[in-house]
Amino acid sequence: MAPRRHVLAMVLAGGEGKRLFPLTRDRAKPAVPFGGQYRLIDFVLSNLVNGGFRRIVVLTQYKSHSLDTHLAQTWRLSPILGYYVAPVPAQMRRGPHWFSGSADAIFQNLNLIGDEEPDYVIVFGADHIYRMDPSQMLDRHIESGAAATVAGIQVPIGDSSDFGIIDAGADGKIRSFLEKPAQPPSMPGNPDFAFASMGNYIFTTEALREAVIADSLDEDSRHDMGGSIVPMFVEQGGARVYDFNDNAVPGQTEQEFGYWRDVGTLDAYFQASMDLVTVDPIFDLYNEEWPILTSSFPYPPAKFVHDHEGRRGFAVESLVSAGAIVSGASVRRSIISPEVRLHSYASVEDSVLFDGVHIGRNAVVRRAIIDKGVVVPPGFQIGVDLDLDRERYTVSDDGIIVIGKGDKLA
């Protein structure tokens, strides 16, 4: 194993998340709740902290209040050991300009790298669902002598046109980096699969500094890590791919091996949520060797009441968070967040209910995502008449009904 080096982790959390609207109407994409009690950003931070990287800055921008609050309440590492998770808003160090891309976010925060003086910089995205030990990727980066290492996940060649694709040789050296190509190159020795970029990078510090400074001077650049910085390293011959399938996480099930989901759309978010509730979940939240960390508020235990025919409080193939009360209602294949109330004779199926949602008596909810604080009136029906739902709510391409935070239903 390569010796441990001084490392700074930078998490890119400034994305607007337009395709997740209305879940991102009042919050940044990395702050979107997931899995009942988590936020999307908890997954990358858990991977970094579990992997031993505990000097972390989170670069924020759009609608960051709930994200900043979550970080302040949850991610307090030991300052006596020099550990921290620090949210950093756009500092406008080069004038009154927001980040114009992920590379510009790094450029505008080069002072953080200068203050920390790391040997290597980890740059990870903030809104993917996966487990990964970044220390293994860092070891590979050091051993290869690369200036930049890009994490790649294997995707079927037929699906790869939706991703940034890495064209690499058998030695791992990246020959080209292609954005959503119509005819993607296959992996070495595996013609049925291609390497898709996960949006996770490791850089040797000085190489990253020189690259983002050069990019800042290019008026034609998109100032994007994948679209601008990585191609720069590819042209210089200094970029390598790291195969995510080589990453072995303690306690991970065989079924979860290689699991990574970009939850950038409502349908992708819904499907990743449903991955959690199967009998043998594709993504297992119960791995105690590599836990997904988050804040633990003092909610009382979840409660199920009433046991009469037709009025029985129960949940099957579901996640039910602390503080929820299922009172004579039925829950199937759903995620119930803290402080949700489900009243008698209500039925919830294949749905995700955020914090504080109330489902009235005799109400029916099917294939829906309902954001915080929504009250579904008694007898109301969601997901029964899709044409009617389209007139009232956001409905995804796959027919998932999405109701925004605090929306009034009548």
Image (spheres, helix red, strand yellow):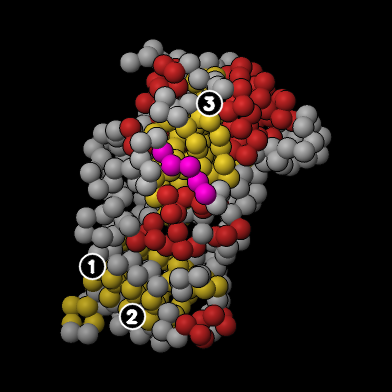
Residue 314 located within the stretch drawn in magenta: no
**Which residue sits at x=54%, y=66%?**
405
Q: Report how far apart the C-alphas of labels 3 and 2 lie in the structure.
A: 55 Å
Looking at marks 1 and 3 on the same chain, the residue that comes earlier in the sequence is marked by 3
Residue 184 colored magenta? Answer: yes
Image position of 177 with respect to 282: above or below: above
Q: Which of 204 and 389 is in front in this view?
A: 204
Identify the amino acid type marked 1. Answer: Val
Q: Which of marks 3 and 2 is in front?
A: 3
Asked whether residue 66 appears in the rendered view, the answer is: no
Please state which of the two labelled residues, at mark 2 or mark 1, is closer to the viewer. 1
Residue type at numbered disc 3: Ala
The label shown at residue 346 is 2
Range of residues picked out in magenta? 183-187
- The quadrant of the image that shows the N terminus is top left
Q: Mark 1 points at which residue?
A: 316
The amino acid at mark 2 is Ala
Between residue 253 and residue 70, name the one nearer to us.
253
| Magenta span: chief secondary structure | loop
Which residue is the site of mark 3? 239
The Cα atoms of the two marked residues, 1 and 3, are separated by 47 Å
Q: In which quarter of the image is residue 190?
A: top left
The label shown at residue 123 is none
